[in-house]
Image (tube, rainbow, N blue to C red):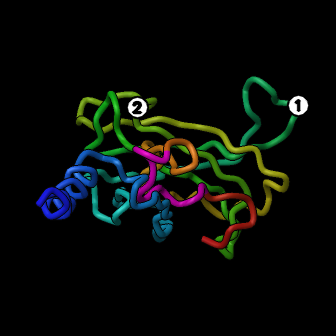
Amino acid sequence: MFPARVLAGAPLALAILALSGCSSFWGCTDTMAERGEAGVRVQVEDTSGQPLGVTAEVVDWRLAPHPQVPAEGDRVNFHYRFDGADEMSGPAVDACAVDKERVALRCQTVHSSQARPEPDGALTGDDWLAVDHPAQVAGVLLLPNDQSYDRRTCEQDVKDGGGTHPPEPAGTGDQL
């Protein structure tokens, strides 16, 4: 009788292990979200591709020497705006200076939490991108994928890691 009781309780024990977060029992998997379509104005989306209710926009951009290092020549100065973002822990998106064929010349992440609140509730800011050939810049685009939260990977924590992560940040040479 004892072995039958043990066998009868095995499915329950496995279910408890699975629900308790012991995912290492079954294996841990990491996946990357698909990169969204770049644009001047984008709806920020989570790793599932669902909109967060936040819009990010490049308001304007120009080539100019950075005031702190004017001898280094022109850089891309761009102004951005987040509508619907939280001042404390809102999303972050990649901003890229691109050429006329939408090839990234330089990218970096801009965080809504580092922007300034405006009277209309928007968060605005500006930043600089140093590109090798400023004359090639045709615009600045944003990628819609929220880069503000990246859960732990399986390699970092096999028990609690895994799941879907934001796509790799955009980099020089990427076609957007």
Q: Quadrant of the N terminus?
A: bottom left
Q: Which residue appears at 25% of the width and 45% of the height? A: 20
Q: Which residue is mark 1?
A: 71
Is residue 11 rendered to the left or right of residue 78? left
Q: Residues within 10 Å of mark 2 (few under 14, many from 20)?
A: many
| Viewer-closest of 147 and 175 | 147
Q: Amino acid at mark 1?
A: Ala
Q: Disc 1 on helix, strand or loop?
A: helix
Measured as percent of width and height from the top left, residue 162 is found at 45, 54
Q: Quadrant of the C terminus?
A: bottom right
Q: Residues within 10 Å of mark 1 (few under 14, many from 20)?
A: few
Q: Is residue 167 magenta?
A: yes
Answer with the quarter of the image where residue 129 lies: top right
Is residue 168 rendered to the left or right of residue 84? right
Helix, strand or loop: magenta stretch: loop
Q: Bounds of the magenta span?
A: 158-169
Is residue 156 rendered to the left or right of residue 90? right
Q: Which residue appears at 47% of the width and 61% of the height? A: 29
Vertically, is 52 above or below 148? below
Answer with the quarter of the image where residue 128 lies: top right
Measured as percent of width and height from the top left, residue 94 is found at 54, 52
> Which numbered disc flags the more N-terminal residue, 2 or 1?
1
Q: Which residue appears at 35% of the width and 56% of the height? A: 46
Vertically, is 10 above or below 86? below
| Viewer-closest of 156 and 133 | 156
On residue 113, which mark appears? Answer: 2
| Viewer-closest of 25 and 41 | 25
Q: In whole angstroms, how far apart are the C-alphas of marks 2 and 1?
A: 31 Å
Q: Amino acid at mark 2?
A: Ser
